[in-house]
Structures are given as C-alpha cells and as structure tokens.
Image (tube, helix red, strand yellow):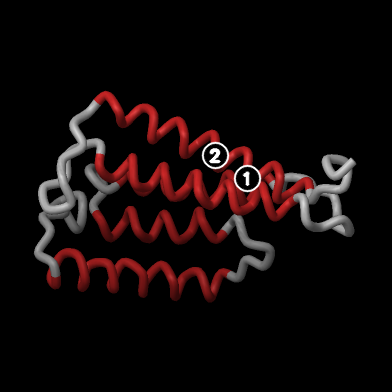
Amino acid sequence: MAFQNRDRKDFNAGVLYIAIGGFFAGFATNYPMGTAVRMGPAYFPTILGGLLIFLGLILLFRSFGTTDAEPPSKTHWRPLLCIIGAACLFAALIGTAGMVIAAAVMMLVGAFGGWDFRWKEQLIGMVVMPAVCTGIFYYGLGLPFKLFPWS
C-alpha cells in the first residue's frame, strides 16, 4: 500500500540517479583505480557514481514518506534544448572561433531558454562574460585558448 502513496517525482529521480551512478561506477571498473594521492582513470567516475547512487537512495527512500505530493509537471523542451545547445555550441566553437566568440554565442543561445528574454541584458552579458572568461582563464590561469579566430 505504501507503494501507491509515494512521491512520484522523488521516486523517478531516485531511480534515475541510481541507474546513472551505477552505470558510471560499473563502467569505471575496467580501468585502474589508483589511490587518493595518485588517482587512476577510474577514481573520479567511481567516486562520483557512488555519490550519485547515495543521493538516489536518499531520494528513493524519501519518496515513500510523503503522500500529498503533486504529479510531475510536463517537460519544458525549449529551456532544456537551449541550455544543452549552448554548451554544445561552446564546445564546438571554442577551437575554431575562439573563446570570446564562443562565450558570447553561449550566452545568447542559453538566454533563449529563459522565460523573459531582454536584448539589453543579453548584450551586456555577451560583453561581460567573455571578458571575465578571458581574464580568468587566459590571463589568470594562463590556459592556451585562442581568443579570436585570427589569433
């Protein structure tokens, strides 16, 4: 009877986290683990997968404690696709167009996923974000990124 009175959102999220964490932790067993001082290629996915499984178990057990939960809402595809698309565009553009243009495009495409798009705010973000990224990653950390396509 308790299975009927569960919070479906927490239950579904818990099962999903356990499945994803188990996949990565299980896949990492093909590689050497290493130690905490000298981490091997399996160390990070194993630890992260274990933490994801632990979080999934917490959500799964918590889902059986509530009875007045609302059903899951519909998936909002535009924000989901815009945010994922912005990250993919950044990854595709950073090597060819440079970090400044890639960061500006990422800000613009990611902003289309929001509920209230304002051009003035986005233009400010498209100037500030590449400037901050350039200051931190190129000048501060000295990472060898191309800043522009011609550099």
Left or right of 122? Residue 139 is left
Q: Position of residue 1 (x, y in %)?
A: 90, 41
Secondary-structure class at tag 1: helix
Q: Is residue 64 above or below residue 123?
A: above
Crowding near the residue tagged with mark 1, few <14, some 14–19, many ≥20 C-alpha atoms within 10 Å? many
> Looking at the image, which residue is at 74% across and 49% down?
9
Number of numbered callouts drawn: 2
Between 128 and 22, which is closer to the camera in this rendering? 22
Residue 88 visible in the current orientation: no
> Looking at the image, which residue is at 14% across and 72% down?
140
Q: Position of residue 17 (x, y in %)?
A: 55, 42
Q: Which residue is mark 2?
A: 18
> Looking at the image, which residue is at 47% across and 34% down?
22
Question: Looking at the rendering, in which quadrant would you find the C terminus?
Answer: bottom left
> Looking at the image, which residue is at 31% across and 66% down?
130
Q: Which residue is mark 1?
A: 14
Q: Which residue type carries mark 2?
A: Ile
Residue 12 visible in the current orientation: yes
Left or right of 115? Residue 4 is right
Secondary-structure class at tag 2: helix
Between 106 and 120, which is closer to the camera in this rendering? 106
Numbered mark located on residue 64 in the image: none
Task: Measure how far apart labels 2 and 1 are at the Cα level.
Answer: 6 Å
Q: Position of residue 71 (x, y in %)?
A: 84, 49
Discs 2, 1 touching: Cβ within 8 Å: yes
